[in-house]
Every structure is written in structure tokens, then in C-alpha cells.
Image (tube, rainbow, N blue to C red):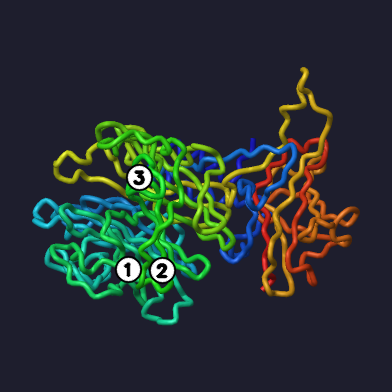
Amino acid sequence: MMLNGNAMAQQLCRLSSAACLPLLLAALAAFPAQAEDPPSSEYFDETRTHTVFAFDQVSIPYSQNLRLEMRQPTKLAANPVVARGAPGTPDARAVQFYGSVIREGKKLRMWYVAVGDDIDRIKAPSEGWRAAYAESDDGVHWIKPNLGLVEYAGNTNNNLILTDPAPLGFVNVKVLADPQAANPEQRYKISTHVYFRHKSRLGTLAPFASSDGLRWKLLTEATPLKGELDIKDLVLPAVHFEPCGGLYLWDGMYYVCGQNAMNATQRYQGRVTRMYRSRDFVNWSPTSNIGFVRTPQYTWLGPGRSLEGEQNHEGISVWNRRNLLLGVYGRWHGAKEWKDIRVDLGFVVSNDGLNFREPAHEWTFLERGADGAWDQGGLLQGQGFENIGNQTFIYYGAWDPRGTGSGQPLAPRGGVGIATLPRDRFGDLVVEEAGKGPGAYQLPEIQSEFTTAAIPLAKEPTHRFFLNADGLGPDAALKVEILDDKEAPLPEYSGANAAIVRQSGLQTPINWKNASELKSLPPRIRFRVVFEGAKNAAIRFSALYVVPAS
């Protein structure tokens, strides 16, 4: 059997982690993507595209005889790709990926939380949590550049970013590139989880901005005390809030996503996802939104039991895909004591920037590692999602909760790992065959199809359309028709003039009468997609893209 690049890489990754990475990269270079997929340089920018994902029931509200199958990503055998540093370095004790990865041109940039082995000697522990930086050309090989900005262990030969004021302890660094910012000094924005004191040690938000992503200034006046904010310097209400999850811009507003267990309009068990918002990243509304609650959390277990039960851990890290947000959250598996708690990652989606839901109910997207693995015990959702060539990279961190709360010195922990999927194939719609078998419930032959919600077209006069689908061929095709917003077929793009796609691929063009670019379409359109052919059960539909031609 001939193997493509991905299959070959999986075979090679059965070797040791140390041997796997160079062989994996060589295999991917020697065995390119399927012939029908474009080279890496020709993939369109998915963040400027309207994407209809198979798992999005708001974008695909109507279907018949189809079933959703979600996919779990595969961890890279060479993980962690960013590991703890050598003794004496700023991240010798911990690389905590409550961080971010963003692409700028051909370079990927990463921010993460670093803890050195000086943490045991620091009287004010918040001062030992610092923000660090790494970068990569391929998303797999990362370097920690010598930035020369911050003194550590008597010199500035390290990768720590500069923050003003300092020291202010960072528990997370979620970075948003904001190229449209009116002030060039605020081209990058950071939301951080820092601490303040009010009877106890409580978490809160500190908003920073930067012109280059390396030198940062707090956007409000504050004088930190022992690495923590004074209560008078808070931008949010004086309640405990951990903004470790996500930072995003949606419909002209900035949102920071995290967790706390404060009461909402109704009582939930433990940690829920909460979002605060700002119009300018400086002034933040005191009111908040509960964005996601797991079903078990509707049953309150009573006072003093905040560790127990199934909960959300640290909010949602998001991937802004223009018309929707994809998100990863921590699936907290609670217990009475820290030693019995575990954390996996789940998957959610939002179409309005406020309300998130699971396409697959209580489903684990990425599982923690086995005992003895670098990611044992629990995972962290970093805000790192990138389509690189024919792969989707999901960056994640590790945190074993079982050593928490014991009062012992911070155990070495963390790192940054990669989990991959075929590009944008988070889930697939497939033909439902349950009704074809014998018995009283055998169904007559019915068509397998779906119809999308109305899609507003961008102002550009011309658009292109693509499918992300597998299993297509001479006896398995997707028929694609264009309808107006009231579901009336557009004659030139439906019926006998419908597009018939028989070629699998990650970005296969949809052509109507050999036309790949369409003009003069209504301001809102829908798609009707039919699974056709004797072998239509082999089809796996992952996504449909509407791309402005510019």
C-alpha cells in the first residue's frame, strides 16, 4: 500500500520522540499533499473567508439523512516542541502555555509564561511569573531568541519580554494582533491574569499594549506591590476572575474570556466561562456574560465543594474565523481532593461571540497524556491555531493539577505541544445508513442533503467557492446549488446548471459551467448540497468556503 505524507509521518512517529521529528519533516517534504490540493503558498487566507463548517448547526440548520462525525487531532510524537529551559534560565521550572501563537508573514510568534528556578527564593511569589517569547519558521521548530530586554540572573541574555510596570506577575499572556489600531503603539494587545489582595489573593485583568510585541506598557496607571496590583488600580470589579482563556475582537468590541465561580443570574457548580468586554481595551464594562456552561454544572453540589464535579477550566481559547469563533476549553474532571483531579480539552463554537456550544455533547477533543508523559494529568488551552500547508496545528500546554494546593515548591511542569488535523477537518457530515438495514424501521431511499443559512456576501463584486471534502469520485459526488435568501433556486446555478464536484481535496474549486468566479449574486445566498452517486456513503464533507476574489 502506498502511503501519502501524513500516513508516512504516522508510521515514522512510532519511533522514539527524539528520532521522530527530522524523519517526520523529511517525509512530509518527500510525500506532498494530494495532487488536487494547492501548494502551501496558494492556500487562501481562511481568516478572511466565510467558512461553513460541517459541525456548525447555525450555518447548516437544515439537513436530511446525514450524520456528524467529529475528529480528534493527533499529538506530535516529538512533543513538547517548546520545552523547559536549562537550570538558571527564566523558564527552567515551567513553560506554561496560557499563551498565544500568531502568524505574521512567514513567521510564527509565540508568547508564554515562564517560571525560573529562582521561584523558591522569591518572597513575593507573583514576581516569579514572567512573560517570554519564541518564534518559528515552520510551526514545529521553535527558538527562544536572545531579546536582551530584561535582566535575569545578572544578565539580559534571555527571551523575556519587557513589561512596564515591572515586576507584575503574569499567569497568562493572550496576545491579539490588531493591525487596524488607530494608535500604532497599541498594534498588539495583551490580556493577562495578574493578582491583587483583598482579604485573600484574587485574580484580575491587566490590559497591556505594544508596538512590536516585545515591549509592553500597561494601559492604566498602576504601581504594583510585590508583583500584584493594588485594589484601587483594577479595571474590572474587585472579584476573583482568571482571564486565562481567550482574547478576541468581535463586532467592534474586545472580549476577554476566563473563569470564575461567582454567582450569575442562576447558580452553577464550580468554574464557568465568563467574558468581560471593552470598546477601547482600556475601559471595561463591570457587567459580564456567561458564555458556556457544561450540562453537569446546572446541578449545584453545595457550599465548600468547588473542586468537585464536571466543570469548565479557565474559559475558552478562540480562533477567529471571521463569521464564527472556534474554541477549545478545559474539561475539568473534579474530585474532593486535588490529587484526584484531571483536565482534558473540549471543543466549542460560537456564531455571535457571546454564546458557545459543543457540536458533540460532552465530547473530549484532546485527551491528557498517560502517567509518565510530559502532558500527564491535565492540559491547557493556549490560543494557538494555525493552518500550515495541508495541516491544522492546535498548540496546547500541560498542567498536572494533582500537585496543586499542597504547599510544596512548584514542581517542574509544562511545555508546548502540537496536535494536528487535516486542514480544517474538525468534523464531517456523512451519509446516515442506519435506515438501510433490515427490520421494521427500514426506510425507503431518501436523499442525503443539507441547506445552509443565508450567507451575507462581502462588498467585493466577485466571489470564489471551494469545498473541503473527501471520498469523492466517479460514483460519489457533491451537487452544489445556489439559492437566494428565501431558498428560491438561482436558475443559472441550480437544477441542470448545478455544480457537480467529484474531486476530493482540502480546497477544491466549485465551478458552475466552468466558471470559478461569480459576479452579480444577490447580497445574501444559501447553498443546497446533495450527496450523490452509488458510493455516496464514502463522502465526508468538512467545509464550504466563500472567498472574496480580492
Is label 2 in a helix, a strand or a loop?
Answer: strand
* Marked residue nearer the N-terminal end (3 or 2): 3
Identify the residue shown where x is 58% and y is 53%: 390
445 left or right, relative to 268 = right
Identify the residue shown where x is 41% and y is 68%: 278
Percent position of residue 542, x then y: 65, 48
> What is the number of the mark on residue 271?
3
**Residue at mark 3 to residue at mark 1: CA–CA distance:** 23 Å
Residue lying at the far top in this picture: please name it: 439
Q: Which residue is mark 1?
A: 207
Is label 3 in a helix, a strand or a loop?
Answer: loop
**Residue at mark 3 to residue at mark 2: CA–CA distance:** 23 Å
Other residues around mark 2 within 10 Å, as few (<14) / some (14–19) / many (≥20): some
Other residues around mark 3 within 10 Å, as few (<14) / some (14–19) / many (≥20): many
Is label 1 in a helix, a strand or a loop?
Answer: strand
Q: Which residue is mark 2?
A: 278
* Marked residue nearer the N-terminal end (3 or 1): 1
Mark 1 and 2 residues: CB-CB less than 8 Å, in contact?
yes
In the image, residue 184 above or below residue 396? below
| Image quadrant where one finds the C terminus | bottom right
At label 1, the amino acid type is: Pro
Q: Residue 384: tell me if it is visible.
A: yes
At label 2, the amino acid type is: Ser
Judging depth in this view, the residue of 32 and 40 nearest the camera is 40
